[in-house]
Image: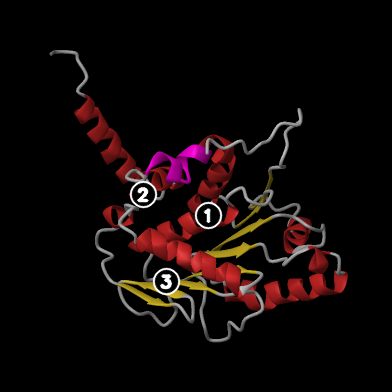
Amino acid sequence: RKGSINYDDSNAVFRATLLLEARGLQFGSYMEYIELEREPEKRFWIPRRNQLATVCSEIQKLINGEYDILTISLPPGTGKSTIEIFLHSMLIGKYPDNCSLASGHSSILTNSIYDGVLSIIQDPEYLWKEIYPDNKNIITNAKEQTIDIGRKHRFSSLTCRAIGASLTGATRCEILLSADDLVSGIEEALSKERLDKLWTAYTNDLKSRKKLNAKELHLATRWSVHDPIGRICSEYSDNARVKSLVIPALDDTGESNFNYRY
């Protein structure tokens, strides 16, 4: 009937638009699209979109080149590592011939990032291959925690490596360097000497891997003002291209800032 809305047509238009935005590195649209076929309660992004909208918006600015470094401080269990996993899965799909690096306080953490990215790009439950249909060949190395898209590269599309592990000759970073909870826990956080060593490891081992125009993302639950995020904020306090986002567990009324649907 003239003027009526065909639900199937409108849904197809919505899906096609979302796909175009996902391929255009619109991070929120990407996360929504790849989970379209998942059960609602199993999805990550849509049930958390309202609470993590600011996080997504700031990451989008990093992707767009408005920032060089972005630090995000959130409470534990709010989805920091998962949103990092989604971001790396998007970027290695878009830039398979360029290398990215994901680091954290331990190989257990970096292995979970490796497994998470691999799940998104290989599991048919996710629609990653609809966004990147040309990326059919995926080469993995679980021991080295590397993923190559398309072909084997000298420096893999994504390398996951703990802050204490050797990076010499292992990788460079042309797209994104992510650092997820570099401080291992309260014991390290209470030791100024250990935090000094951690800062040295970050500047000498991680930061030195970055090539020109590579972006940097730090995600953490803060333990100390002397942790890497604290020192970055202090060192670049007057730099508009370095952004720090902090979302506490509770709002001003004492209610949770992370009251997710599931």
| Quarter of the figure with the N terminus | top left
Label 3 crowd (10 A; few <14 / some 14-19 / many >=20): many
Q: Mark 3 points at which residue?
A: 157
> Label 3 to label 2, Cα distance in Å?
20 Å
Q: In this view, does 67 lie above or below 104?
A: above
Secondary structure under the numbered disc 1 in the rendered image: helix
Point out the stretch of residues depicted in magenta.
39-48
At label 3, the amino acid type is: Ser
Which residue appears at 54% of the width and 72% of the height?
Answer: 211
Q: Name the residue under label 1.
A: 82
Instruction: Answer yes or no: is residue 32 visible.
Output: yes
> Label 3 to label 1, Cα distance in Å?
19 Å
> Who comes first in sequence, dot 3 or dot 1?
1
Res 187 → quadrant: bottom right
Residue nearest the viewer, comparing 261 with 135: 261
Query: Looking at the image, is mark 3 or mark 1 nearer the viewer?
Result: 1
At label 1, the amino acid type is: Thr
At label 2, the amino acid type is: Ile
Q: Name the residue under label 2.
A: 34
> Label 1 to label 2, Cα distance in Å?
14 Å
Res 12 → quadrant: top left
Residue 42 in magenta? yes
